[in-house]
């Protein structure tokens, strides 16, 4: 093994969520650059609020901090952390090094979770703000698809066995309904996020009460001012050293739930691709298989399913973490949250981008769908034929027996001989059915078997889906370039 200082970049493990999949904006949201510049901004907010409330902090000290908010010496911070074994104090020292005048008041009265937890909440909030427009675009593309194919009959499936007809657009609305639930859940989770604020080492604000010489109003004002500067409307009124880790459960559970939705959608598309009824986009020069040149593997949907499983599995982390937070806090949450929080958002990000690409280029093969319907519809139409015969004066029980015998004969041809469904030919050849033969085309029109599916699609899109997209109209037309 080569010495560590000789290891090349491509010889080190890098998370594929960043190196291969996720968008630059989401990767940046959980980057060290975003994290540590946010820490510095939080120290600036704290200093500004403390100054405004009468603590001996000068304008020059605040200005010095603002000047150096972005120029982080990461090498110095790493060296400091190797000595101090404390990441926050390492960055306090690094910031103080380039802000000598402000050094005495950086992090004044605060504990590590002031920057750590508040930054996590900012990243969660900003992560939702990245995901929500992406989810809106997926819903928009799928809505257009559902509207276009609202009246195209297709076999329904229950237990993955042919069932009553539905339409291609109505089936897409089943997917859309789940995505709409995810949209509302993510919106609520984002709206419910609060700031940890300025709470001190065990959440009692004792250090700040001491700084302000027992003035409770000023401590509350400090908490409110910093919360507003950070862009939050509210802070949690009570915390331990950390904000409640149930907040992480709330955020990640909705992402995991969305993962389940996307896994189901992409699994459906994979099943339909096997039937050659619907396919995901396929590039002109894309290779489906190294051994079988004819294959058009649904690799985008497979990627979504693969990553969605990871997203669903990540929910176990915050559930277990919240359950073992002793009293005011214990540090066994830290290492886990460094992985589970970013990975959940990074994973959600890539599966939404991939699903947008899929829904923008879904290919439908109506002739294949029609062939599958013709293969099954004669069996499904038997009740309609019986009703037509009864209207023409026939006896229901006699007709039912005739149809039953012919159906069994046709089923034998299909299942045992591998032939086509010839039930209609058998009906047409039997003189018993002469009264309805002139109406068979109407009786077997697939559009008479789809019920109110087209009307349901139109109403659902109009009343539930389109209004959900209104807040994202300005971002709805953004295209994404998917790295394959």
Image (cartoon, grey):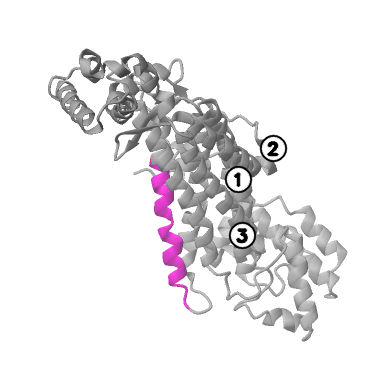
Above or below residue 62? Residue 287 is: above
Q: Is residue 191 left or right of residue 352?
A: right
Above or below residue 132? Residue 447 is: above
**Distance CA(mark 3)–CA(mark 2):** 26 Å
Above or below residue 337? Residue 14 is: above
Choose top left, top right, bottom left or bottom right for residue 291.
top left
Q: Nearer the viewer, mark 2 or mark 1?
A: 2
**Distance CA(mark 1)–CA(mark 3):** 17 Å
Identify which residue, 207 or 305, lies in the foreground: 305
For the stretch drawn in magenta, what is the main secondary structure?
A: helix
Residue 285: where, in percent of width, then height? 43, 15
Magenta stretch bounds: 306-326
Which residue is label 2 attached to? 473
* SS category of the residue bearing label 3: helix
Please check the rendered image and state whether residue 316 is part of the magenta-colored stretch, yes or no.
yes
Query: Could you classify mark 2 by the number of other residues whose Cα lies within 10 Å: few (under 14), some (14-19), or many (20 or more)?
Result: few
Badge 3 vs badge 2, beta-carbon distance below 8 Å? no
Q: Is residue 22 visible?
A: yes
Which residue is label 1 attached to? 132
Q: Is residue 283 left or right of residue 122?
A: left
**Distance CA(mark 2)–CA(mark 1):** 12 Å
Q: Nearer the viewer, mark 1 or mark 3?
A: 1
Which label is found at residue 225?
none
């Amino acid at each position: 093994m080569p010495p560590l200082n000789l290891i090349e970049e491509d010889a080190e493990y890098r998370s594929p969520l960043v190196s291969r999949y996720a968008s630059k904006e989401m990767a940046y949201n959980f980057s060290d650059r975003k994290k540590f510049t946010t820490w510095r901004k939080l120290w600036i907010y704290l200093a500004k609020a403390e100054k405004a409330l009468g603590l001996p902090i000068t304008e020059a000290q605040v200005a010095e901090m603002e000047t150096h908010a972005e120029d982080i010496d990461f090498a110095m911070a790493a060296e400091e952390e190797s000595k101090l074994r404390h990441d926050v104090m390492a960055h306090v020292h690094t910031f103080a090094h380039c802000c000598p005048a402000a050094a005495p008041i950086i992090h004044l009265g605060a504990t590590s979770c002031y920057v750590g937890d508040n930054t996590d909440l900012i990243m969660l909030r900003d992560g939702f703000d990245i995901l929500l427009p992406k989810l809106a675009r997926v819903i928009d593309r799928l809505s257009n698809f559902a509207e276009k194919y609202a009246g195209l009959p297709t076999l329904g499936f229950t237990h993955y066995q042919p069932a009553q007809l539905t339409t291609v657009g109505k089936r897409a609305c089943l997917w859309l309904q789940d995505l709409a639930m995810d949209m509302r859940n993510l919106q609520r989770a984002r709206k419910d996020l609060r700031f940890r604020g300025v709470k001190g080492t065990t959440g009692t604000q004792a250090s700040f009460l001491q700084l302000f010489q027992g003035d409770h109003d000023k401590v509350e004002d400090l908490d409110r001012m910093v919360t507003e500067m950070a862009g939050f409307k509210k802070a949690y009124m009570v915390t331990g050293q950390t904000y409640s880790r149930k907040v992480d459960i709330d955020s990640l559970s909705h992402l995991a739930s969305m993962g389940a939705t996307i896994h189901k959608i992409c699994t459906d598309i994979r099943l339909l691709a096997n039937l050659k009824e619907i396919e995901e986009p396929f590039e002109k020069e894309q290779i489906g298989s190294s051994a079988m040149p004819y294959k058009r593997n649904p690799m985008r949907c497979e990627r979504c399913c693969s990553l969605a499983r990871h997203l669903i599995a990540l929910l176990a982390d915050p559930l277990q973490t919240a359950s073992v937070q002793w009293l005011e806090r214990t540090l066994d949450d830290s290492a886990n949250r460094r992985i589970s929080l970013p990975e959940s958002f990074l994973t959600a990000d890539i599966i939404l981008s991939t699903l947008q690409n899929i829904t923008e280029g879904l290919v439908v093969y109506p002739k294949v769908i029609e062939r599958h319907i013709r293969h099954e519809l004669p069996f499904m139409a038997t009740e309609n034929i019986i009703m037509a015969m009864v209207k023409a004066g026939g006896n229901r029980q006699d007709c039912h027996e005739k149809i039953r015998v012919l159906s069994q004969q046709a089923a034998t041809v299909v299942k045992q001989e591998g032939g086509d469904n010839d039930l209609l030919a058998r009906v047409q050849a039997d003189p018993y059915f002469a009264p309805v033969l002139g109406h068979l085309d109407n009786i077997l029109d697939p559009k008479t078997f789809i019920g109110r599916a087209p009307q349901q699609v139109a109403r659902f899109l109009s009343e539930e889906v389109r209004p959900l997209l209104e807040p994202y109209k300005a971002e709805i037309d953004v295209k994404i370039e998917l790295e394959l």
